Amino acid sequence: MVDWAVDNAFLREQAERCRTLAEKADPSTRSRLLDLAASYDDRLGQASRATRSLGSLLETQRACEQAEVGEVTGPAAARSVQRRVLG
C-alpha cells in the first residue's frame, strides 16, 4: 500500500508542477503542459504498467504450476492453459 501512496503523491506533484509551469508558458507550451498534467491526473489511483505486467506474469506462473501439478482437469483443459500461457 505504501507503493501506491508514493506513486500517487509523485503523480500529484508532477501534475501540479506542470500546472505551475503552464502559468508562465507561451500558449502552445501551456496547452501541452496542461495536457500532461491531465494525463498525470488520469493515472492517479491506477496500478503502474509494471505492476499490471507483474500481475499478469504471476497469473501465468500459477496456471503453469497448476498444470504441472495436475490440478487442471483433463487434457483439453491442460491444452487450454498451455495456449493461454504460450500465446
Image (cartoon, helix red, strand yellow):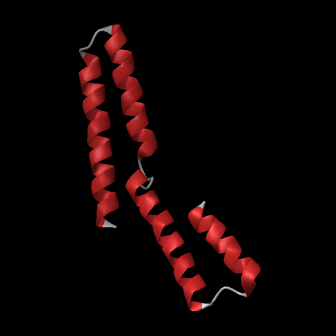
Query: For the C terminus, which image quadrant?
Result: bottom right
Percent position of residue 63, x then y: 57, 77
The reply, left or right, for residue 38 in relation to residue 69 is: left
Give the residue drawn at x 38%, y 38%: 40
Is residue 69 placed above or below 10 in the rendered structure?
Answer: below
Percent position of residue 16, x then y: 28, 34
The reply, left or right, for residue 49 in relation to residue 23 is: right
Percent position of residue 72, x then y: 66, 85
Q: Relative to the observer, which residue lies in front, 66 or 41?
A: 66
Q: Relative to the observer, which residue lies in front, 60 or 5?
A: 60
Numbered label tally: 0
Is residue 71 placed above or below 43 in the rendered structure?
Answer: below
Give the residue drawn at x 58%, y 64%: 86
The answer to whether any part of residue 48 appears in the image is no
Is residue 50 placed above or below 64 in the rendered structure?
Answer: above
Give the residue drawn at x 62%, y 71%: 82
Is residue 78 placed above or below 10 in the rendered structure?
Answer: below
The answer to whether any part of residue 40 appears in the image is yes
The reply, left or right, for residue 21 in relation to residue 70 is: left
Residue 11 lies in quadrant: top left
Query: For the N terminus, which image quadrant?
Result: bottom left
Percent position of residue 60, x then y: 53, 70
